[in-house]
Image (cartoon, rainbow, N blue to C red):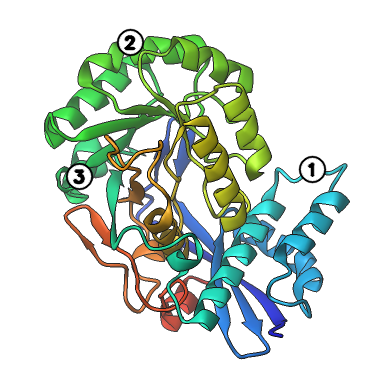
Amino acid sequence: MTKITAVRSTGLEYRMANGRAYGNARGMTAVRIATLIEIETSDGVVGLGEAWGPPTVVKAYVDILRPFFEGREIFDFNQVRHTLYARMYHAGIQNPMTAALSGINVALYDIHAKLLGVPLCKLLGGKRLDRVPAYASTGYYSNDDSYGIAQQLEIGEAHRYPGTKIKIGASVESDVERVKLAREMIGPDKLLMVDANGNLTVDQTLESMRAIAPYDIHWYEEPLPPHDFAGYTELTARAPMRVATGEALYTVHDFKRLTDGRCAHILQPDITICGGLDETLAIAGIAYMENIHMEPHVWGGAVGLATAVHFLAAMPASPHTENVPHPAMLEYDRGENPLRDDLLKEPIAEADGWLTVPDKPGLGIELDPAVVKRFTVC
């Protein structure tokens, strides 16, 4: 039986040049990060995964987790996970340990698929799509006047995608200004989404929603802090548009609180945070049972992007129908990030707002060692 012989992590960081920073209503950043997870096996197969969070912190958790996995069979992930969850009874699991487990879980799935000689999406239920639709995630706040929302929409060619998402949430006045500009630039027929990154209260969100409603908003993402479940229940009941949330939540248990409380119209787990593919499949299961739409959050490096592409390629249409008015789309960040664009020897192909699903075994990707070395910080 194939066993795990080594678990390694590599922290990556890219710092934007010339003092440029961009971000959301909560604040700005000049750094893009990712932590790569590599698992070696007794058969010589190496699996790749990605974990979200500060690399030094994630790496510390990987070091703690390593002894629990090395020497185990490659099918033992859930046994180890349940042991770890039990031991974290008093400390909790809403922390980077779960992000580290996410990367390990994906790397093991990559190994399973490689050993079977099939693309990862085959293990997730079958390849439903050969390519997945994507929306442009852009329109960040910026400290550089030459890189404002209009320039970002133009550089990122937002008009080519089925939908576009922009950042709002600093004030109602700026919300209207930014949304109006985005709608004018992408045209009347494309989907437009907005994201406040948890910067608002219920009343503030409703004021913002009413102000931007004339611009046909497809969803309003993460208006409240992630664990304000009571606030989300109230907001979703009163909102004049769809509410989406979930990118900062961990495990299916957090998402069950969302569905039990009818806290959102759209669930947005991030595979590199919530616990990996096993947890994301469980979240998809409750979304399916509760007839709630799911749109995975993606905002990291190339390995996380590839994982999400495979997941969407296999994810059943939701709700129960073969004629979905608005099929789930891949979040395709168009911000400056070589950890996404340059990390692979062959980047995932994108054309006219669609990303091709890799057809090689596993994730179907190969890291460029020189690029990995250039951005390694720990």
SS type, badge 3: helix
- Front position in the image: 347 or 105: 105
* x 55%, y 51%: residue: 281
Residue hosting label 2: 210
Residue 82 percent location from the top left of the image = 79, 55
The answer to the question of whether label 2 and label 3 lie on touching residues, with beta carbons closer than 8 A, is no
CA gap, disc 2 to disc 3? 25 Å
Residue 312 percent location from the top left of the image = 40, 53
Q: As shown in the figure, which amino acid type bears the numbered disc 3?
A: Ala
Q: As drawn, is 260 to the left or to the right of 240?
A: right
Residue hosting label 1: 92
Label 3 neighbour load within 10 Å: few <14, some 14-19, many 20+: many
Residue 280 percent location from the top left of the image = 56, 50
- Image quadrant assignment for residue 357: bottom left
Q: Would you say residue 295 is visible in this rendering?
A: yes
SS type, badge 2: helix
